[in-house]
Image (cartoon, rainbow, N blue to C red):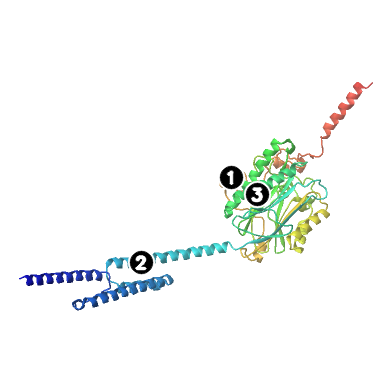
Amino acid sequence: MGASSKDENLEEKLSSSRSDASDEAARTDASEPASKRPTADDEAGDDEAGDDESDDEAGDDEAGDDEADDGEADDDEADDGEADDGKADDGKADDGEADDGKADDGEADDGEADDGEADDGEADDGEADDGKAKKPVQLLVFGQTDVGQIREHNEDNFLLANLGKNQRGLEGSGTETWSVAESGLLLAVCDGMGGAAAGEVASQMATDIIFEHMSASAGHGERDGLAVDIVKALEQAGSKILAEATSNRACRGMGTTATVAALVDDHLLLGQVGDSRAYILRGGRLVQVTRDQSLVNQLIEAGQLTEEEAENFEHSNIILQALGTADSVQVDLTYVALRRGDVLMMCSDGLSGMLRDKELLELLSQVDEPAEACRALIEEANLAGGHDNISVILARFDGEGLPELDDAAVASLKYLKYPLASGGDGSSAEGGKGRGHDDSPSIEVHGEYEVEGDVDWDQMLTDKRMIPMQSSEAGMPTWAWALVIGAVILLYLLYRP
């Protein structure tokens, strides 16, 4: 009886042990491939063999994981291989929905990665396109100014600035090579007026204010934004110069011309106030790409004066606009689509007034190096009389970012308005708050001569003899001198002994 009970207890323990082993094997099966699961016959065999198979199965499972990892690595290298490997892995493992889900998620993730790679490819294409648009544009640049042969001091100023480096002026005494970046390059020539040292003050203020404004807004890398900044810089310079002229008696009547050139890509933008000039030399042609805001140019365009008559016109120094002479200015905004080999020349009327365009073309064609060409131009202007201060900037453009020169580009070179409707603050890109370009003068201009503010401009163009003016250096008019002389004679007669 006792022995039978012991035998029954032993069999129950063995049965329980076998049941536990079976449950453990089942749990192990849940994480193993079907091909690796132990069979019923194997379970009937010894437990050690089953344990050995479990160990082998675990090793096989790890090997399978390694294969899956290899498949994932292959997936990273090849999208097509990725899809096939994913299916093969699924075929090997049918153990559970959880693993299949992971595999599916992995495929989904891989798909997302593929999409990401495709998107990245699109981004790369975009960058490549941007790279095409922003291939390097370089220029050799130099600038110089000279007092001339007649003036006692120099009222001209010029500006060379690499806005990307916040560099103003040249680092050395010769020609430098600059690259166009998103921040842009800035060039300007200003011809001051107003007598004594006031003209020099005005031109210096203009270059300083223009540089400060353009530097503060640099980095936009966008052409329309650059155009608006040029207009705003000139308007700001005009306002500040006017404020100084109003508050400082020594600066009363001062003003300055300003011709500004800037670029962030293959288009050169130009802002013009006054009669300083910008030319482009291309394919043997020298073309003025700015428009003089002067009386003589107004008369020529109105058909009241020929080019030959203009050379000897006694009032050729009257300009219609200047910075610092009124509350607002009308900026003439133009542009040039550059080509490889283009040469930009910017100058004050001390150069263009002394040398004809044919002479300028001849000199520029003979001398390629900008520094040498600047010195040669100034020397020739002085030999021609040097009646005014002389300032000149030369820049020769090149680089893969510019199209090759062809006959069509040579023939089409001309003065072109920049098609910008309005600035960010509602001001017209052609200049002035809310106004478009107007050929008639809007301000009283101070210089060597003065145009009175109440002049009928239509009558001025119709009859040149009706232009009211007087020389600022002539002193008192004749009638005033006659009154003084008469008063002196009268006093002499009354009080003589």
Kind of residue indicated by mark 3: Phe
Q: Residue 305 has which mark?
A: none
Q: Secondary structure at mark 3?
A: helix
In the current view of this chain or complex, which residue is farthest to the left? Answer: 1
- First in sequence, mark 1 or 3: give its number: 3
What residue is shown at x 73% (from left), y 35% (from top)? 249
Nearest the eye: 10 or 256: 10
Separation of marks 1 and 3 at Cα, in angstroms: 20 Å
Task: Name the residue carrying label 1.
Answer: 427
Residue 232 in the image: above or below residue 52: above
Q: Front-most of 450 and 62? A: 62
Q: Which residue is mark 2?
A: 106
Residue 303 makes an appearance in the image: no
Q: Residue at x 15, y 72 (%)?
A: 14
Residue hosting label 3: 211
In the rendered structure, which disc, 2 or 1, sits on the residue that comes first in sequence? 2
